[in-house]
Amino acid sequence: IAPDGEEHWVGGQYLEVEPPHRLVFTHAWELATGENSPETVVTITFRDSDGGTEMTFRQSGFGSASSLEGHEDGWAQSFERLNLFLGTESEGPDHA
């Protein structure tokens, strides 16, 4: 649910699950027309780092720069909410 209250639905399949190190899944928005947006692939890796956990997040397969930017904004909001829920601080996204 976006900050403005708009609901966004997404579907996909898990491609790899390697606890506690790696998670890979497909991601496609469910559109109002009943169809799905083009599918992307999300890869998340976790590693121990200075008594905590470092997460590396990558999403690939975008059809346009505007789609990439929209996803970047959406994930940033989701990670901010996760930090609030966990009561942690983040160094912010690394776009390397």
Image: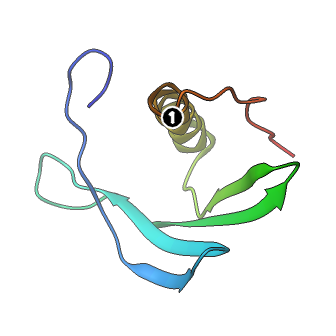
Report the label total.
1
Residue 5 position by quadrant = top left
Residue 76 position by quadrant = top right
Mark 1 nearby-residue class (10 Å; few <14, some 14–19, many ≥20): few
For mark 1, what is the residue? 86
The residue positioned 21% from the left and 26% from the top of the image is 6
The residue positioned 87% from the left and 46% from the top of the image is 96
Q: Check the picture and name the quadrant holding the N terminus.
A: top left
Under tag 1, what secondary structure?
Answer: helix
Residue situated furthest front in the rendering: 51
Viewer-proximal residue among 83 and 23: 83
The residue positioned 48% from the left and 84% from the top of the image is 15
With 36 as the anchor, is 84 left or right in this view? right
Residue situated furthest top in the rendering: 4
The residue positioned 55% from the left and 74% from the top of the image is 24
Colouring scheme applied when the structure was drawn = rainbow
The percent coordinates of residue 53 (x first, y second) are 73, 53
The percent coordinates of residue 73 (x first, y second) are 54, 30
With 41 as the anchor, is 1 left or right in this view? left
The percent coordinates of residue 88 (x first, y second) are 62, 29
Q: Is residue 74 above or below residue 68?
A: above
Three-letter amino acid code at the position of disc 1: Leu
Residue 8 position by quadrant = top left
The percent coordinates of residue 66 (x first, y second) are 56, 36
